[in-house]
Image: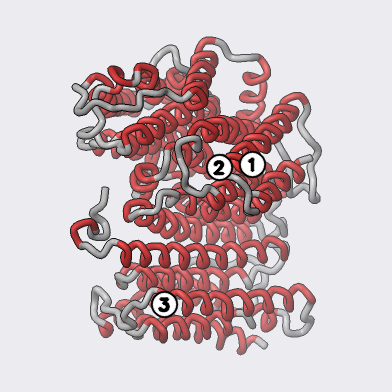
Amino acid sequence: MLSLLIAIPFLGALAVLLPVRTMFRVWFLFAISFVHAVGTASFWWRLPASEWQGYLTLDPLGLILLSVISLLFLSVSFFMIGYFQHEHRSNRIFTASILALLSTMTLVSVSYHMGLMWVAIETTTLFSAPLISFHRNWGTLEATWKYLLVCSVGIALALMGTFFLAISAHDVHTLLLPSILSGASSLSVNWLKLSVIFLFVGYGCKMGLAPMHSWKPEAYGQATGMVGVLMAGGLTQCSFLALMRVSQICYKTGLSDFYASILIVTGILSLVVPAILLLGEKKLKRSFAFSSVEHMGLLVLGLGLGGVGILGALFHMINNALAKVVMFLTAGSVAQKYGSSHATEVRGVIHIYPVTGILLIVSLLAGTGMFPFATFHSELLIINAAIISKHYVLAGGIILCLAIIFIGIARIVLEFVYGKPTEPVLDKKENFFINITIASAAVALIGFGLWMPAPLSRVLHDAVALIVG
Amino acid sequence: MMSWIDVSCILAVFLALTILATHRIVGMIKIIALQSFLLSFVPLFLHAEAISGRDIMLSGGTMVLKAVLVPAILFWTIRHISMRSEIKPIIGLGTSILCGAVLIAVAFWISLSLRLPGKFESSLVLPCSLATMLLGFMIMVTRTRAITQVLGYLVIENGIFLFASSLYDAMPMLIEMGILLDIFVAVFIMAIVLNHINEEFERTRSPVHRPKWGESQ
């Protein structure tokens, strides 16, 4: 079942390379995403058996990520139906890359071997690069290059970390996660520490944590909105799964304090840096990219603080993905209507496109974690964890940074929405597919904010238990 | 076969240092091809007394992908994008070599404090792979051309590969092949992006429409 879920999108990617009509590819992509979502939904009922001698195993941690990915692709493929009614560029490579990305991201969430996980995450980098340069111009090409280089080199460090882990697990003779965890007492601690540092820097680079975030504003700022969704909601969280796997090993070997200090320092840095940089930002998508750095920082902080923080981080994974759907798809819809996402060119959206204007406000509130959106709850859980573990200054710092980030994003979005329109726009049509996708993600986010379903709560608690051990 | 491994390790570092001293891109690619070719023998040297099918596969795969196909792609790229073959590093060639020598010393100094558990074939594997990696980073940061960054990346990967091939049982062959294939595809995609950048450069003739690298927002 698991290998089928990986194989179907991959075969689909090969199929869309055939010369067929643009809209056929889009509908085909939607169909495959739908099948993938149905398969994933069935796992909530019963977890599938391991395959390939335990290399592919789905546990609650993987299930959360897999569901997030499945939801993202479903919404993006639905959005694309509306998008490609106005876009006449060939989408052959684009749809093929998206399907291949779906396949490899599924592989990340089910891989139970640290080496296989590296291969899968590196492959996601490679398939996402062509997506950034869909509109081929200077900006996108430069962004693609930066993304490819920074992430490839970053992830090469993670490869080195994986080999250090292999040396540390010399007596275990394998990098299968259950074997490492059960043989945790035989791991060599010095090598493990070295490995943890390398793995963190490598995967953290892919996640876009603060000192390694330089590719993020470029890539998200230049890519179309839907690519932003897949990257900010999916790709970065795939790397977060790798960091959680490292966390599992650290908890078993008593290195959790060592790892936690790295996570907390990077986490707070990932809040401070966007808070400072956002104040001078003029472009919508770039400001959302900084918001993504902030959310990655929150995830890492939650994981580092432990206890209820881990629960918050896991819940935040889902909320962050949904919020990114709202934010980037709205930004993409604005960019398609105006041909720009620069604050000096887009003004007074609410006067011309009322629905898009409201969605912009919603994306501001959802992205910055306002009540009743679920992002509010998960951020509260993470701040709560800081207070419980007596990091009072840290908690205050988080709140201050979140407030500054809210001001920074609100400044841009409000100018977009309520500013004076610069010129009359002739085509005033709203697109059904686009708006329904964004609205349903927002509704889901409010839903999770008001009521958490019992199965979700159970899986989240199981996942926390897996990490803490 | 101990000595053969030592020789390959030292040669790998030596070749990485030679790249630092080279100012022609074609020459750099040739040296990287030679380095990859040399490193593809390491799995065979390591298990010289009982060479298994896995070693042969790994060695052959490395040779085909990294010593033949990757250089071929790079040569294709520089032919297509008609760039000047000479490059000017940020710091002079002599200074580069001096810095490279310091980096090698640092790598050896770091590996003094790291003890490899279990039986390892050669004490030179760890310091030499670290030195090759550091030199790769040095190539990346001191050369300003886009393609030289790819070359630096390849040198880093060669350093990691040298280290990886000394770990026998942790990685199944399929995954090692996956790693190799990933690196190959990475270079392939980088070459395509370079080509697109060049096309875009040719298309936008007017310098007014052409933002300088790093300035487009």
The image quadrant of residue A283 is top left
* Label 2 crowd (10 A; few <14 / some 14-19 / many >=20): many
Amino acid at circle 3: Ile
Residue nearest the observer in this picture, B65 or A335: A335
Question: Residue under circle 3?
Answer: B78
Measure the alpha-carbon separation of dots 1 and 2.
7 Å
Mark 2 secondary-structure assignment: helix
Mark 3 secondary-structure assignment: helix
- Quarter containing the C terminus of chain A: top right
Q: Check the image and tell me how it is coloured.
A: secondary structure
Amino acid at circle 1: Ser
Above or below, comparing residue B79 to residue A383 in the picture: below
Question: Residue under circle 1?
Answer: A109
Mark 1 secondary-structure assignment: helix
Tell me, for residue A238, which label it has, or none: 2
Residue nearest the observer in this picture, A468 or A115: A115
In percent of width and height, residue A297 lies at 41, 36
The image quadrant of residue B87 is bottom left
